[in-house]
Amino acid sequence: MSTLIAPSILSADFANLGAALIALQEACCDWIHVDVMDGHFVPNLTIGPPVIQDLKKRSSLPLDVHLMITNPELYINDYVKAGASHITVHAEACIHLHAVIQQIKKHNIKAGVAINPATNPNVLRYVLNDLDLILVMSVNPGFGGQDFIHSSLEKIKHLRTMLKESNNEQVLISVDGGINNHTAALAVKAGANVLVSGSYLFKAVDLSHAIKTLKNSEQTSLN
Ligand code: DX5
Ligand code: ZN
């Protein structure tokens, strides 16, 4: 499958999200990545269900909601109602990870689990069958514009092998943090098939060219 591009609107002008959505849609991205932060799980605060509900009205693209919040099980229903197509929770934030995944799936939307840079990917071993998406954090969550942590590449490779060996290759591996024209190729080569990118895309002079560049990482990674 071709690499999916999920721009993170964390780097957009929050006073002008509607315009950002239109620009991203015209530039042919695949999903919109929405970073939800609670000032508790991560030291930053962003947006919640009412804003996502309004984003949903303006865009037909899937909304890939990344919950960087504690006790996500208390809020899943609100994000489903707001229009999320994918809900990703952090393994570190869930005492009962298996149960939270089931809670997301019962709404017939895609379920994802994110893991922080220091988290062992084996924490996902016994839930692989239940997942649609694994999100590998390649920065510590909380802020855009940080440098890519290179040990995430080994983690992506490890997960790719785990998925292959367990016959779960339909599970997508998404990588989030510090993705630009250089790191994208490394991540795709390691086995990622979704690239989340914020500051690289929003700083680009030509958004559509930058999205194409990330999409073509597949070719770059073969060189
Ligand atoms: C970080 C967020 C990322 C972030 C990516 O906590 O999960 O989605 O916005 O931004 P860049 O691409 O700037 O690292
Ligand atoms: Zn994110």
Image (spheres, helix red, strand yellow):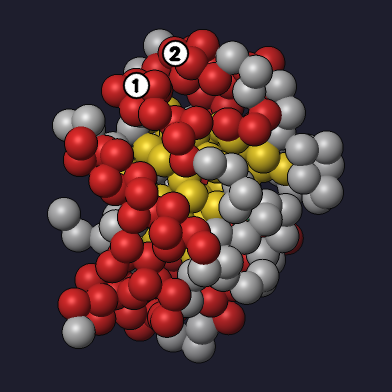
Residue carrying label 1 = 130
Kindly tell me whether mark 2's CB lies below 8 Å from ligand 2: no
Name the amino acid type tagged 1.
Asp
Query: Tag 2's secondary structure?
Result: helix
**13 to 50, vertically: above or below:** below
Does 148 sit left or right of 164 as displayed? right
Point out which mark residue 5 bears.
Answer: none
Depth check: 199 or 82 in front? 199
Q: Position of residue 124 (x, y in %)?
A: 44, 31
Left or right of 221 on screen, residue 159 = right
Q: Amino acid at mark 2?
A: Gln
Marker disc for residue 102? 2
Pick the residue in front: 53 or 217.
217
Q: Position of residue 95 (x, y in %)?
A: 65, 18
Image quarter (top left, top right, bottom left or bottom right) of the C terminus:
bottom left
Q: Earlier in the sequence, mark 2 or mark 1?
A: 2
Give the position of the N terminus as an image quadrant: bottom left
